[in-house]
Image (cartoon, rainbow, N blue to C red):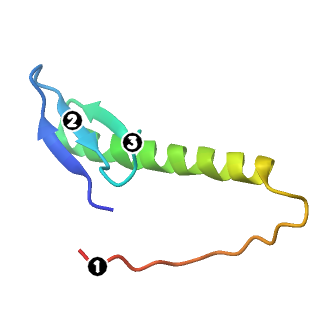
Amino acid sequence: MIPAIYRGDDAWIMAQAPELPGAVTQGRTMDEARKMIKEAVELLLESYRENAERDAPGNTVWETLAVDVVT
């Protein structure tokens, strides 16, 4: 994932993951913004996984899938 990081109007550094709606955060520095967007993505994906597991039928088979994304 390649986050979009830019300076906001209020001097905060904004970060978002355009491929993942809802993954938006900010930091006082570039490093903090990078750390925060990583955490936001992890938390959002964890939430999606938990919701999927809760709502899935009882006979669901879960597998791990690795995906290569060309940038």
Give the CA distance from mark 2 to mark 1: 24 Å
Amino acid type at circle 3 is Ala
Amino acid type at circle 2 is Met
Name the outermost residue toward the top.
10
Q: Residue at x 90, y 66 (%)?
A: 59
Q: Is residue 22 left or right of residue 58?
A: left
Q: How many marks?
A: 3
Residue 49's spot in the image, x, y percent? 65, 53
Residue placed most toward the observer, 68 or 11: 68
Residue at which label 3 appears: 23
Amino acid type at circle 1 is Val
Image quarter where the N terminus lies is bottom left
Residue 40's spot in the image, x, y percent? 43, 42
The picture quadrant where one finds residue 39 is top left
Residue 28's spot in the image, x, y percent? 20, 30
Query: How busy is the neighbourhood of tag 2: few (under 14 within 10 Å), some, or many (20 plus)?
Result: many
Residue at which label 2 appears: 14
Q: Is residue 24 left or right of residue 11?
A: right
Residue 10's spot in the image, x, y percent? 12, 19
Q: Is residue 50 left or right of residue 29?
A: right
Residue at which label 1 appears: 70
Q: Residue at x 28, y 47 (%)?
A: 34
Name the outermost residue toward the right.
58
Q: Which mark is residue 39?
A: none
Please say if the residues under marks 3 and 2 sit with CB atoms less than 8 Å apart.
no
